[in-house]
Image: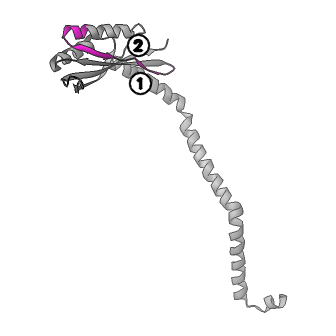
């Protein structure tokens, strides 16, 4: 075997050396280098995630301040004395003033956070379009909550086959924690 290698020309020896080197690299890469590169990619991802989380308390404070600012701009009251009964009384008064029928006053839906609670009161009224529009205006103007949505639609009673115009209102009230 040694004689065979000695008899080879330097050019063939160089080629065999390159082939042996490539084979060694091909064997070493999956065992060491690939795992190292994979771990480095994971480290980079975790560093990026850590950097994005670092300023999270500052962003949370800014979001809370912006929420309170938007609540004040939208007229959402922070008054805890606004109750379901007071909103029902205001809606009933507005309906009576404009000869509109209060069809439905559903249960309140609440969305809470540590610092505030938003109560949403769904209301359905029925009557002539202009009278309902005036009632909605009065509810918005005098109401202790904020009317955030009004949808007008036609309703057909299945028994009597009569059509009527209705409006669905969503009245919100924001309660801030002490």
Q: CA distance from mark 2 to mark 1?
A: 15 Å
Taking the view exactly as shown, the residue that stands out farthest to the bottom is: 7
Pick the residue in front: 133 or 58. 133
Pick the residue in front: 128 or 134. 128
Local secondary structure at mark 2:
loop
Q: Residues within 10 Å of mark 1 (few under 14, many from 20)?
A: few
Contact between labelled residues 1 and 2, with CB atoms less than 8 Å apart:
no
Residue 4 drawn at (x, y percent) = 80, 91
Local secondary structure at mark 1:
helix
Quadrant for residue 129, please give it. Answer: top left
Residue 161 drawn at (x, y percent) = 19, 25
Residue 38 drawn at (x, y percent) = 63, 55
Left or right of 100? Residue 38 is: right
Q: Could you tell me which quadrant the N terminus lies in?
A: bottom right
User: Which contiguous range is marked in magenta?
Assistant: 93-114
User: For the point 41% across and 7% down, which residue is it?
Assistant: 81
User: For the point 83% across and 91% down, which residue is it?
Assistant: 3
Left or right of 59? Residue 151 is: left
Q: Nearer the viewer, mark 2 or mark 1?
A: 2
Left or right of 39? Residue 88 is: left
Residue 112 drawn at (x, y percent) = 47, 21
Kindly identify which residue carries mark 1. 66
Q: Is residue 110 magenta?
A: yes
Quadrant for residue 171, please give it. Answer: top left
Kindly identify which residue carries mark 2. 78
User: For the point 28% across and 11% down, which residue is it?
Assistant: 91
Quadrant for residue 123, please give it. Answer: top left
């Amino acid at each position: 075997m040694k004689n065979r290698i000695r008899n080879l020309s330097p050019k063939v020896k160089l080629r065999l050396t390159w082939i042996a080197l490539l084979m060694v690299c091909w064997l070493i890469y999956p065992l060491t280098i690939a795992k190292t590169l994979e771990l480095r990619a994971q480290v980079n991802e975790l560093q990026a995630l850590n950097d994005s989380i670092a300023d999270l308390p500052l962003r949370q404070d800014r979001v809370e301040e912006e929420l309170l600012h938007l609540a004040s701009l939208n007229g959402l009251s922070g008054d805890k004395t606004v109750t379901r009964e007071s909103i029902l009384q205001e809606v009933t008064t507005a309906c009576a003033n404009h000869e509109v029928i209060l069809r439905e006053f559903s249960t309140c839906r609440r969305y809470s956070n540590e610092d505030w609670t938003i109560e949403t009161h769904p209301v359905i009224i029925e009557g002539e379009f202009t009278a309902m529009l005036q009632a909605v205006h009065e509810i918005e103007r005098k109401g202790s909550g904020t009317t955030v949505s009004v949808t007008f639609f036609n309703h057909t009673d299945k028994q009597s086959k009569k059509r009527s115009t209705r409006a669905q209102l969503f009245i919100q009230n924001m309660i801030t924690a002490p």
